[in-house]
Each structure stands twice: as C-alpha cells, then as structure tokens.
Image (cartoon, coloured by chain):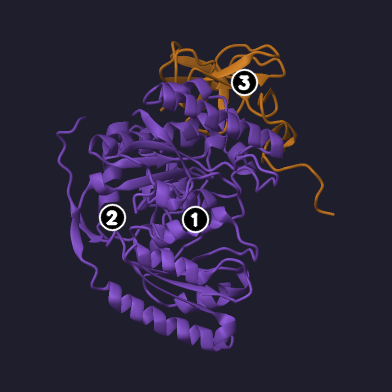
C-alpha cells in the first residue's frame, strides 16, 4: 500500500504524514485538490510535507488557518518543521532542538 | 444524528443538594503542605477515599474556592479537612461550608491532636465513620442529561488534531444533543483562532466575551514569555503553538458555545462552555502558562464535571481525584505501547477502520460504562494527581454563582 498523508482543507499548503514517509510518491487523503505529492526527503509520521513551494515570509496554512510563517525557501515535497518555519507568537520555540524539541538554554551547570 | 437516539441510563448517587454523582467518595483535604503526609496516610489503603490539598501557608481565595468546589462535588459524599494548626486556611471553615451543602464533614488540627501517629489514627477513625454514613446515599437513575463532561489534552502530537480531539468534539456534539453539558478549557491553546472562536458564540454577547477571553490568554502568555507548547509536542510533529491550538480547539466539537465560566463556577445551563483558567491581571503575577495537565483537570472538576476525558498523543499516565479521568489517544502506536494506561483508541479514524461518528459513539458508550461504575484505566491504577496553585481570578462568591 502506498504511503499516505492527510490534507484537512482545500486551502492548505501542507499535508500531515500518516506513515513514516520515504522519498517517493505519497497518496493524499482528505480535502485537498491534489491526489499525490512527490516526497523529496524522509518525513516522520505526524510531521508535515509541503504541497507547494513556499518563499520566506509565506504563511503555512493548515485547516484553512495560518499556523506559521516560513523563514527559508521551501520546495514542494520537503519536510516542514522547526528548521524552516516559525510561530508568529512564540519566540522561544525558535530556539528548540529541531529533532527533539528539547530546550537549548544552558540551565544545567 | 439527533435527539432521537436512545442512550442507556445507569444508577448514580443522589446528593442532598439535588445533584447526581457517579462515584461515592470521602474526600480528605489538607490545608497546608505540612499536613499532606498525615492526610495521605489517612487515605492510604482506603477504598474510595481521595486526597486533595493546598501547599501554601498563606491562604489564597482562588485555592479555597477550588477546594470548596471539590468538597461539594457531586461525586463526593463526605469530607475530612486536616490542618497543621498555624496556617491561614481554616479546616473548620471548609467543613462548615460542606455541611451547609447537606454533606457530613469533620475537621481537626494535627497540633491539637499530638502529632503524626495519633492524627493518622484519629483521621482513619473519622473516615471509617464517614464511609459508613455515605454508604446509605440514595441511588437514582442517571442519564447523559445529568452529566457534565470536561475535556483536556496533554502530551499532544500531530494525531491530537487529526483524530484524538476531533473524536471527543464529535462525542460532545452527541452529548449536547442528548441534553448533556460539556466544558472545555485551555484558552492558552486557542492561539491564532480568535475569529473562529468568536463565531461559535451563542449570541453577540457571548462572542464578545470569547474575544476578551482570547485576548486575556494571549496577553498572559506574552507577559510570562512562555506559550503552551512543550518539547514533546514539537518532537511529535507540531511546529508551533498555532498548530497545536488548531488541534486543541477540535475537542470543542461544533455546537454553539453558551458562555465562559471561571474556575469553580458551575455551568449555569446545559450545552457547551469554555472554562477560562487564565489568571486575571493582578499586582502579583501568578503561575506560568498552563503549568501542567493536572491543574487544568482539577479546574475542570471544580466546575462540577463528574468525568474528564483526556486526549493524548505522546502518551500520558496521569489520573485525577474526585472525577475519573478517561484516557483517549489518537495515536495507535501509543495505544499499543501504553495499553495498560489507555482507555480508548481514536486512532482508528486515521487508519480508516472507523469514521468519526462511529468512533465518537463508541467513546460515548465507554463513558456510560465508566459512569455506571467501571473504573477507567488511570482510576484502576490508582493515579490521582492534582495541582492547586496560588492564583488570582475575580469570581463572584460561590453562593452567588453556584448551583449547589
């Protein structure tokens, strides 16, 4: 069975991985216009994959709501997370480890 | 879906104040940290005896209101309040208010009694008497229309917004259509959703109040410089508090929001209510954004919720005192890994084996079973975490705004 991702709303520019995605075609379920997207890199279960190219400053749309803004160029099919998007409210989350979410302030000395 | 669905009823407990509970508990309350060891020892090994308390020596109006709301909760039949003897919060005042609700209550100070061992013995003797007395609590038929169900999410990941919370939201729609009451909270996890939230208001006045609640929550997060998202959320695929909020909001379902209530206020009517647990502006800055999940759960229970549904993605092991916690996950991997702690797998919605409606109805059936007496997984494990902090909220007196 093909690997899957889920789109909540037709206006969304990201889909959420329902499997651990490997590079290659991904079947899209839900409400979007696309039925498939080419995944360019591994995307873990629960993480997001871009459905269009995004420029720095572009809003990331999920369920028709702006959930973040891009701060790097993102290509269609790439993973979308802390390494290329940021909150428009929360500054601290920009400093967290991109893989684990762990804080990077040095309290432990 | 509609009012034509026939749901099973079950036997509840009828309190003297007219409210119906799904458990019949003795609650031991300690009024300062110094009394917590004795309070816990009194309850140790006793079935259906729970403990809550406040650690501070200086009293706090908010914390006292929470303790009084828990003491007069529909699931609670009797109360023992235990203090050390030098603190501000007065155990005998708590007992007095509880008696006015038609419940039996006792209180004593450890310092009057002579220390640890004699206080534990005294407390255990009192509790035996209270348990015997409430064993005669009349039973009464209960249905969904008698339930207030709270909901909280914690340890969220990307499945929370795709399955866990939406299933609870759809369950709420069924509950409300059946005449029940639903309370959701976590205003600090509605970030970026002000318009969406306001559109759910029953009328213009409620919409305006929802807008104010949103602004207060957002301002508080800015002031304390911490937003309600933790490392596990990010590791679970959520990239921002806005994305987490999208998922959290889904647990409110689709019915209109009737209004906003504060901690320890009882919903003035049926339907869906937002609980605002964010501190009000004050000369002291209290707490931290959503300090932990147990605080939110206790806040929900303080509104009279006989059951709280808890949605997790990463996996949570906590329970709660006074009202059973029902553990739901939208992540099938978590459900398998933590099978001993999880009550319900909403992840079937993601693998396509069930749709949202089916899953919501299954959850409602489980809720009815647990209301009828079957222990939830956290309940069976003995988890009874709680957290009552110092806080300030401007709330009318309990006698002015309470159904009890």
The purple-tinted chain is B
Q: In the rendering, at what x and y percent does residue B61 appear?
A: 56, 55
Q: Secondary structure at mark 3?
A: loop
- Determine which residue is flagged by label 3: A78
Dot 1 alpha-carbon crowd within 10 angstroms: few under 14, some 14 to 19, many 20 or more: many
Say above or below: A25 vs B357. above
**Which secondary structure, mark 1?**
helix
Q: Chain of mark 1?
A: B
* Distance in Å between CA atoms under marks 1 and 2: 18 Å
Question: Could you tell me which residue is drawn at 65 percent across and 48 percent down?
Answer: B287
Residue under label 2: B19
Q: Answer whether labels 2 and 3 touch (C-beta < 8 Å).
A: no
Q: Are marks 1 and 2 in contact (CB under 8 Å)?
A: no
Image position of B258 with respect to A28: above or below: below
Chain under callout 2: B
Assign the N terminus of chain B to one quadrant of the image. Answer: top left
Residue A7 is situated, as x and y percent measured from the top left of the image, at: 46, 21
Residue lying at 54% horizontally and 45% vertically, measured from the top left: B155
Decide which of B250, B59 is in the foreground and name it: B59
Query: Where is the C terminus of chain B found, in terms of image quarters?
Result: bottom left
Q: Earlier in the sequence, mark 1 or mark 2?
A: 2
Label 3: how many residues lie within 10 Å, few (<14), some (14-19) or many (20+)? many
Quarter assignment of residue B16: bottom left
Q: Is residue B338 above or below residue B164?
A: below
Query: In the visual, does B7 lie left or right of B98?
Result: left
| Dots 1, 3 in contact, CB < 8 A | no
* Location of mark 1 (residue): B66
Q: Position of residue B48 (x, y in %)?
A: 36, 70
């Amino acid at each position: 069975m093909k690997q899957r991702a889920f789109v909540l709303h037709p206006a969304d520019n990201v889909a959420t991985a329902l499997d651990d995605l490997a590079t290659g075609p991904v079947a899209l379920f839900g409400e979007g216009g696309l039925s498939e997207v080419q995944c360019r890199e591994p995307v873990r279960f629960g993480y997001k994959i871009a459905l269009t190219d995004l420029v720095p400053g572009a809003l990331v749309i999920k369920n028709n709501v702006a959930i973040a803004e891009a701060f790097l160029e993102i290509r269609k099919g790439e993973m979308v997370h802390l390494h290329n998007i940021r909150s428009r409210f929360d500054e601290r989350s920009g400093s967290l480890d991109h893989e684990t979410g762990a804080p990077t302030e040095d309290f432990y000395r | 879906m509609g009012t034509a669905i026939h749901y099973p009823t079950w036997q509840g407990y009828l309190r003297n104040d007219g409210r119906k509970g799904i458990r019949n508990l003795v609650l031991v309350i300690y009024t300062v940290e110094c009394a917590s060891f004795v309070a816990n020892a009194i309850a140790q090994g006793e079935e259906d005896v729970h403990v809550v308390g406040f650690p501070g020596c200086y009293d706090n109006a908010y914390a006292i209101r929470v303790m009084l709301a828990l003491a007069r909760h529909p699931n609670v039949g009797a109360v023992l309040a235990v203090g050390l003897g030098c603190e501000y919060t007065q155990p005998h005042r708590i007992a007095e208010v509880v008696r006015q609700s038609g419940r039996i209550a006792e209180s004593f100070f450890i310092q009057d009694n002579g220390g640890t061992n004699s206080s534990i013995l005294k407390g255990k003797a009192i509790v035996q008497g209270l348990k015997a007395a409430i064993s005669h609590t009349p039973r009464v038929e209960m249905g969904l229309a008698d339930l207030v169900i709270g909901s909280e999410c914690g340890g969220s990941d990307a499945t929370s917004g795709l399955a866990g919370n939406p299933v609870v939201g759809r369950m709420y729609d069924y509950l409300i259509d059946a005449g029940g009451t639903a309370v959701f909270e976590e205003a600090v996890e509605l970030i970026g959703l002000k318009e969406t939230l306001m559109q759910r208001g029953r009328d213009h006045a409620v919409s305006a109040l929802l807008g104010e609640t949103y602004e207060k929550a957002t301002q508080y997060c800015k002031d304390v410089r911490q937003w309600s998202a933790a490392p596990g959320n990010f590791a679970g695929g959520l990239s921002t508090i806005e994305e987490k909020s999208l998922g959290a909001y889904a647990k409110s379902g689709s019915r209109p929001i009737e209004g906003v209530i504060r901690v320890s206020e009882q919903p003035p009517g049926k339907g869906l209510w937002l609980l605002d647990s964010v501190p009000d502006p004050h000369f002291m800055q209290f707490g931290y954004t959503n300090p932990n999940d147990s605080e939110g759960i206790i806040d929900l229970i303080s509104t009279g919720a006989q059951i709280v549904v808890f949605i997790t993605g990463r996996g949570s092991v906590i329970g709660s005192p006074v009202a059973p916690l029902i553990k739901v996950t939208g992540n099938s991997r978590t459900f398998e890994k933590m099978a001993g702690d999880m009550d319900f797998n909403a992840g079937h919605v993601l693998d396509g084996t069930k749709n949202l409606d089916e899953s919501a109805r299954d959850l409602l059936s489980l809720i009815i079973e647990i209301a009828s007496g079957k222990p939830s997984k956290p309940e069976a494990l003995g988890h009874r975490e709680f957290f009552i902090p110092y806080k300030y909220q401007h709330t009318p007196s309990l006698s002015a705004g309470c159904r009890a």
